[in-house]
Image (cartoon, grey):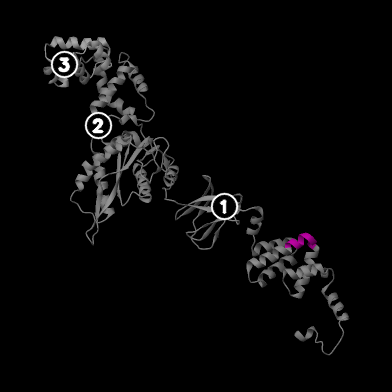
Amino acid sequence: MANRTLTMNKIKQILRGHFDGHGSKQLSKLMGVSRNTVKSYLKRFRQTGLSFEEVNQLSDEGLAELILGPPSPVQQSDRLETLLPLLPGIVKKLRTKGMTRQRLWEEYREKHPDGFQSSQFRKHIREYVGRQGLTMHFDHPAGEKVFIDYAGKKLHVTDPETGEHFPVEVFVATLGCTQYTYVEATYTQQKPDFIGSCTRMLEFFGGVPRVIVPDNLRSAVSKGSKYSPVLNETFETFAEHYNTTIIPARPRQPREKSLVEGAVRLVYQRIYMELQGKVFLSLESLNEALFTLLANYNDYALRGEESRREQFETLERSSLLALPELPYQLMSVKVCTVMKNTHICLGEDKHYYSVPHQYMGKKVKVLFNDDRVEIFYKYHPIAKHKRDKRKHKYTTLREHLSGNHKYVSDWSYEFFVEKGNKINKEVGTFLSKLMEFIPHPEQGFRSCSGILHLARKVGTQRITAACKRASEYGVYTYSMIEQILSKNLDSISFSDEQLDESSQMPKHHNIRGNRYYS
């Protein structure tokens, strides 16, 4: 007799071939089984004394009992009687993160040294899980995965003024270990609604699973692939914010998202049916009804087990990663070129934001929302600013500027007065009056910068004397200081200069003199 029992269909084919006149050797080749196996089944058939037509009318169960004999009665040993009451607790422990069948078997053998060996122990776990309809539960460790999808059947919101019905999408998410479920309605499946649903889902769970498994919808996956899907960039930043991983279900692999598809079917049965005939005048009122029914759904006691909520609280909540302090906010994306003044322009506001000077001329990616602006170069963050919507204004961080730009960025009335006072109080006074006399601040700052540059060239003594002489003239400009220094007027006193001018000036009745203007 063969070691492995053949299927009833193959046994019937062997019997049919025998009645069609094929020998055991030919049947062995046709059926892909050994010749001795064919002979064994034909011998058992002859012992029944029935014709092929009579055998062919039997059910598979009847044929199996006839050909193979009735199943042997199961004798429940003392070891099995000891193990059976322990199986619910063992299966529950198996769902916790890090727990293995081997470790559970070792704990079992410590308490029951005469118990089953590892292979039989695992076999009884599989049989128990199969009887309870819990297949696949413990394939997902606690806190490991959440499966998300949209229900195929839409719900509706009614316009209170026109009575028109608007279809809305239903977002469904279920945790892999405990099947604790979240449901909400949104107007669309588009990116803002999808990201918003994922954010509220994690807040509902009170933590973050290590893996999110979406279907291949466009809001999550830009390009589907069996081996290397391309994620939507916004969904990637969402995953980074929550420190989780996105692994989309592979196309045409329904078993990879069977849990959420099963959850969708149950949502149809337990939630949709309760909403039949009810009218909702807003999305908010519809979601209120959904959340009430969802609470009942999660509190429903499963067959032979605790409810989803009870299992979630005892098994899965503590295994989830912590939520960040702030929820994710949807970011818009655009590409900008860093200008020569080391700023980028956010066109939406016509506002300028600084970037480290070494990225001048580079193309950078800008992510922004109502609160902040983040700038990246080749996926590396290089700048972050609070968003400012004032047009034609600059937001500048000093550390982003080059050495020369840093110096210019420090320019102010106080800056130049302080620099002048360090040389001499006379210089500080002159610079302050220069900035008062010149109406445009930037022009005054440039003149002050020029005078400080002259001070480095001619020295402290000469620039002090030049500023004093210019003050005596009552002229507060850069060009006056430059002329005084070029003509060496700083080396003679103001009174000597006046005497020298009067000795060289001829007297004439047509020459009025400077007193005429006083």
The quadrant of the picture occupied by the C terminus is: bottom right
Residue under numbered circle 3: 65
Q: Position of residue 283 (x, y in %)?
A: 28, 53
Within 10 angstroms of label 1, few (less than 14), some, or many (20 or more) residues?
Answer: many
Badge 2 element: loop
Within 10 angstroms of label 2, few (less than 14), some, or many (20 or more) residues?
Answer: few
Is 288 situated left or right of 322 in this image?
Answer: left
Residue under numbered circle 1: 355
**Disc nearer the start of the sequence (3/2):** 3
**Disc nearer the start of the sequence (1/2):** 2
Q: Position of residue 172 (x, y in %)?
A: 30, 43
Residue range highlighted in magenta: 452-460
Vertical arrangement, residue 282 with respect to residue 292, above or below: below
Q: Quadrant of residue 472?
A: bottom right
Amino acid of disc 2: Glu
Is 255 situated left or right of 461 in this image?
Answer: left
> Would you say residue 455 sits in the magenta stretch?
yes
Nearest-to-viewer mark from 3 and 1: 3
Prevailing SS of the magenta stretch: helix
User: In whole angstroms, how far apart are the C-alphas of marks 3 and 1?
Assistant: 81 Å
Q: Position of residue 56 (x, y in %)?
A: 14, 19
